[in-house]
Structures are given as structure tokens and as C-alpha cells.
Amino acid sequence: MAVNVSPACMGCQACITTCPYEALFINDNGVCEVIKDKCVECGKCVEVCPVEALSLPKAAVEAKTTADPKSDSEANHTTATVKETPSVKVAQLSGDLGRYQGVWVFIEQREGRIMPVSLELLGAGRKLADKLGVELSGVLLGNQVRALVDTIYEYGADKIYLVDHPVLNYYRAETYMQVFVKLVNEYLPEIILMGATTTGRDLAGAVATELATGLTADCTALDIDTEKRLLLATRPAFGGNIMATIVAKNHRPQMATVRPKVMKMEQPVPGRRGVLITPEIELSETNLLTRVLEIVKEQGEQVNLQEAEIIVAGGRGLGDRDNFHRICGGLAEAIGARVGASRAAVEAGWIEQKYQVGQTGVTVAPKIYFALGISGAIQHLVGIRGSDIIIAINTDPNAPIFKECTYGIVGDVNKIVPLLIEPLQKLLAPNKADQGKQLGEGGVRYAS
């Protein structure tokens, strides 16, 4: 028996670098193939596959479940005082690197509200911490944000480092970097995760530079090499043509940023509690080089594809700007959806860049994603893999999008979309009503 490979495989090679037994290779068709004699069904390749194209045989899954049963009391454990023992022996490092222990997640908050990407990263960090057998900690910086700690515990943190100070009321790279670096130098985490938001990217770069350590940006998968105790950070490279797994062998902490909606947010455990650490850090406005004089919020239309439940996205296959707006805009307006676009449509000047979906745009996870005239470049597929349902319409039966989609229709979007509008209106009427309350009566919210 061996790992199963489904037609969804994109040939990204993320699994090949992860497999410790060299049991995987890319065949002449550009997809992953398994050398059955070498595969031991360890499951490492399954965990890193960005499109979930790999799976363990049923017998192997059942064997693992039988070998490691958990009682109901263990499954519902709500305290953070006991760390999970790794199922695989993890290497222990010596020397300076061995002093670093634990996984940290930067808890980004704005105006007292935790950004969803931080909660998503707590779920990812929990898995990494459990594999290493260490604590998962949240780092919360701000002013009057103590009320957020309970939520952070409930989403998986064992410990929280809280610095609550008026100087941290607004994000500034100068102040947040100084505080974060002091915490790192004192408590020595081995892994730091941050959201790839405007704030997270700015802070991560500043912290990594100050600490002289490595930083992998815009990751799509995270895992642990237990034999070498390394963070395996996977991201698209060379314009998205390959998936590269990057490691920092000689420096700590190991840092990575992850885009919103890439990682699945785990269900919170109500009542879960942990340890609160409140370090004493001196901060004074008089010693700072920058000051926040005023916060000016952007006026006008806000595009938030990450929160949309239904997205209608168009690509090069729609032909031109007018047809793009007619087809995508018409369907989106009819069913109460938001409009998105592929990179090709944006570069053609059909719509603004803020509507771009994909690795070089925005990562989304709607309930329904319509891909109209989109062939399915790997950058785009990585950005939509969190969608519950993907419906693709394309004239090319060999388009990569058909390997990723839930439902595929081979044909002309100009003929097919008008036929779908009426039945979809009936099925999705509640969603349209909800969108109408948010947007007001009128057309679809996108710039034309």
C-alpha cells in the first residue's frame, strides 16, 4: 500500500521535498507519482499538499486511530497546563539553537478587535507546537487590550505575553518592533508566525532584520521536520511556477508570514485558559522618533473579498473589458455576490488590482467561488483553495482549474452564465437579501 494521489495534483513538488524516504517524484505528465516500495505511509506529504491531492489509504488511517486512541475527557480538555506529547520523536538541539523553545503567534488587533488571520494562525501554530511538544504562545501588544486574552486562550494559546501600554495604542513599526524584539531576546521562541497583512508584513520584516534571522513570506503551508527540528515553510516561487519549501537551519527564531484565509480557523474551546505573562517594558513618547498625529480612514468603496460568502471571478477567457463587466457583474448582481478577477484580467486593465484573487492578490475562502474564463494558474489556485465550492466554466477541457473545482462546465461562458442566473437566484435568494442590507439597493460593489 502507498499514499493515494488524486487528479487534483498540480505538480507543485511541495510533497517531494517533505518526504523523508524519497518515495515521490514528478512523472512525465507533470503530476506526483509514488514509489510504492519506498512509501511507508508516514503522512508527511499529505500534511503539506496545498491542494489536498494526497491521502493515506483507509487502512493506514484506521491503524493510526487504533494505535493512538483518545478518550472523551482528553478530547475536551480545556486547560493549557499540559503539552501534547509528540507522536514522533523530535530532535533536541544543542548549543545556542537549543536555548530556543516554543511557538509564538503575533496577535494583530485593530481598535481592540483581533484580526481573523491571527486566530487562523493560532490553529496552525497549535499543530506545530504539538509536533514539537512545546507551548503555543500569543503575543498581544496594544492599549487597553487585556479583554482579548480569553479569546486567545480559547483559540489554542497556552500562554500569552501581554504588553498593554498607551504608547502602543496605534501601530508603529518603531515601537512594536522594539517591544517584540525585547520579548524575543528574553523568552527565546524558536518559531514566530505573523499574518501577511499590511501590519504583519511591516513588523515581521523589521523584527527579522533586527534579530538577523530568516523570514519566509506569504507561506501556503507550514510543517515541522522532526528529525532536524526545523520549520518547513512552503510558498510559491519563480512567479508561482513551483512551490518552494524554505528552512532556516542556522538561525533562531524561525519566522514566517501567512496570508489571511490560507490556514483554517479552528473552533474555539469555551472556558480554555492558560498562563498570562505581563513583562515590564519602559516606553516613552519622548524617546521615539515617530509620532501618530492623526488616523485618516480611507473614504469611498471598500473591497473585502476575504469576507465574501460568494465570489464571481472572471479571467482572460471573457475576452474584453466590456464582456468581463457584463458577465461577472451581471451574475454577481443577480445572486448577491462580490466580483473578483484573475491576474490576467487585472493586467489587461479590465478591473482594479484590489479585486485580484490569488497568491499575488488576495486569498479568499468563500462558500461558493465562480471561476469564469479562468484557466487556473497555480498562483490563482493557491488563493482559492479554501473555498467550500468552486464552480468553473471554461472552453478548454484541459484547463488546470478543472482539477481543482467542485463542479466544472466545459463551454462558452456567454451562453452558459445567462442560463444559470434564474435557477441560482432562486437557490441563493437569502444570500442576496443579506447582501442587499449591507450594500443598499443598486448594483454590484465594484469599480467600473
Image (cartoon, rainbow, N blue to C red):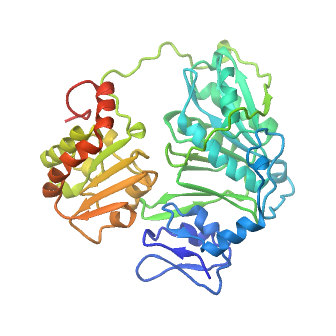
Q: Quadrant of residue 106?
A: top right
Instruction: Name the residue: 34% across, 29% down.
Output: 302
Instruction: Name the residue: 54% across, 75% down.
Output: 4
For the N terminus, the quadrant is bottom right
The one of 404 and 61 positioned closer to us in this rendering: 61
Q: Position of residue 436 (x, y in %)?
A: 28, 28
Q: Position of residue 330 (x, y in %)?
A: 18, 42
For the C terminus, the quadrant is top left
Q: Position of residue 28 (x, y in %)?
A: 42, 83
Does 73 sit left or right of 367 as displayed?
Answer: right
Residue at the outermost right position: 95
Does 69 sit left or right of 205 as displayed?
Answer: right
Q: Quadrant of residue 332?
A: top left
Q: Quadrant of residue 290?
A: top right
Instruction: Name the residue: 26% across, 32% down.
Output: 445
User: Can residue 351 be spotted in the picture?
Assistant: no
Compared to residue 4, the image places residue 130 above or below, namely above
Q: Position of residue 293 (x, y in %)?
A: 50, 12
Q: How many marks?
A: 0
The one of 430 and 133 positioned closer to us in this rendering: 430
The one of 331 and 364 positioned closer to us in this rendering: 331
The one of 269 and 205 positioned closer to us in this rendering: 269
User: Can residue 118 be spotted in the picture?
Assistant: yes
Instruction: Name the residue: 16% across, 61% down.
Output: 412
Compared to residue 381, the image places residue 443 above or below, namely above
Compared to residue 26, the image places residue 295 above or below, namely above
Does 244 sit left or right of 307 as displayed?
Answer: right
